[in-house]
Amino acid sequence: MCLKTVVCSGIFLLYLMTTITTALLLTGSKETVQYHFINESLTWYEAQSFCRLKYTDLATINNMYEENHLVSTLDSHATATWIGLYNGQYNRWLWSDGSGRADFTKWSLNQPDNYGGIESCGEMYADGFWNDAPCGVTKAYVCYESQQDGSKKYVYYLQGETWPSSQDICRQKHTDLACVHSEEESLAINALTYRVWMGLFKDSWVWSDGAETSFRYWQRGGSYSGNCVSVEGSQTGVWIPADCNQKATFMCQGDVKLKKMVIRIKVQSDVDLTDLTASNLLLQKLETILRDREVSDFSLKWQDDKYVFQR
């Protein structure tokens, strides 16, 4: 045992473990989505690295339900906030409701041809075959509603709207614009012989975590440019392309990654550190210093060759 008149040495062990309270969302598919708003301004690339280090990735939004939850997670933060969508450069045909790529297709002869380089939305002809067309043209359109038994109910609107306006109306009143995944669904939509917009569109945006969801929630109007996407908290959560090198707050998703770190501090002192009162005061002082620096979830131990003191 060390005496107060003798120099004593030992090791402090500092155990640190990071934790955080998570925001959970239980979706209709019973999968849990966790969003974490990070109130720190970073570039999109820096935010991606941060989220991958501490969680899973930047936030992915699969549907309108998750969009609403993400906006509620922003709470009063009326700010541009990075999510995980970025420009992947290569266009592909997708479905408006988030169901991903258009694997089943029924293109008319020589379509899609992207005539004039401006045809990024899909319509169904009266004969049931498909054509690509400019999204700003007004047409009749067909929405769908998901039923409890898993089936779809189709609702036709004969008053012409642009493709974006048709999408907005379908999402407000039903589920989304009609999406076609089989010949059976194609025949159900084509039962009335109207030339209509459906939920087919073309873009090159992809998700940081590799998710296949094709859900989008763009700001209407305005002129924006950039290869990364932010959510505008002040504008009901609409999405806006932005320069990836701009700094903004960001939204991560996924489980927090717990990390345990042990720091060993070797000290020498002329105080008898085996004395319970002395060692406890020293541990208490270290604890206060750590908490003042906003370090939490840790434990402290003092040990020498014979004794271990823990706080």
Image (tube, rainbow, N blue to C red):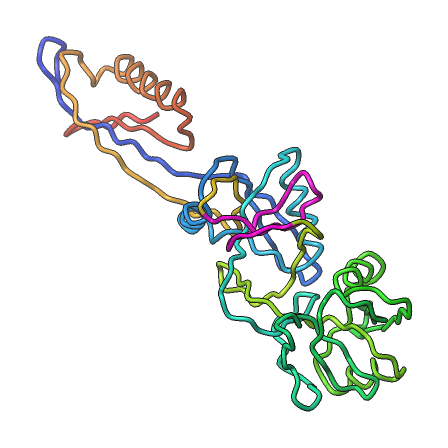
Can you name the residue that lies furthest to the left here?
A: 6
Q: Is residue 39 magenta?
A: no
Say left or right for 276 vs 124: left
- Split into 4 quadrants, where in the image is the C terminus? top left
Task: Please identify the quarter of the rendering in which residue 9 is found.
Answer: top left
Which range is magenta?
Answer: 223-244
Q: Which of 268 and 65 is in front in this view?
A: 65
- Split into 4 quadrants, where in the image is the N terminus? top left
Identify the residue shown where x is 88% and y is 84%.
191
Identify the residue shown where x is 27% and y is 25%.
309
Identify the residue shown where x is 53% and y is 63%.
206
Q: Which of 46 and 38 is in front in this view?
A: 46
Say left or right for 301 vs 111: left
Residue 307 place in picture, x, y as percent: 21, 27
Does the image show residue 289? yes
Q: In this view, does 247 lie above or below 56?
A: above
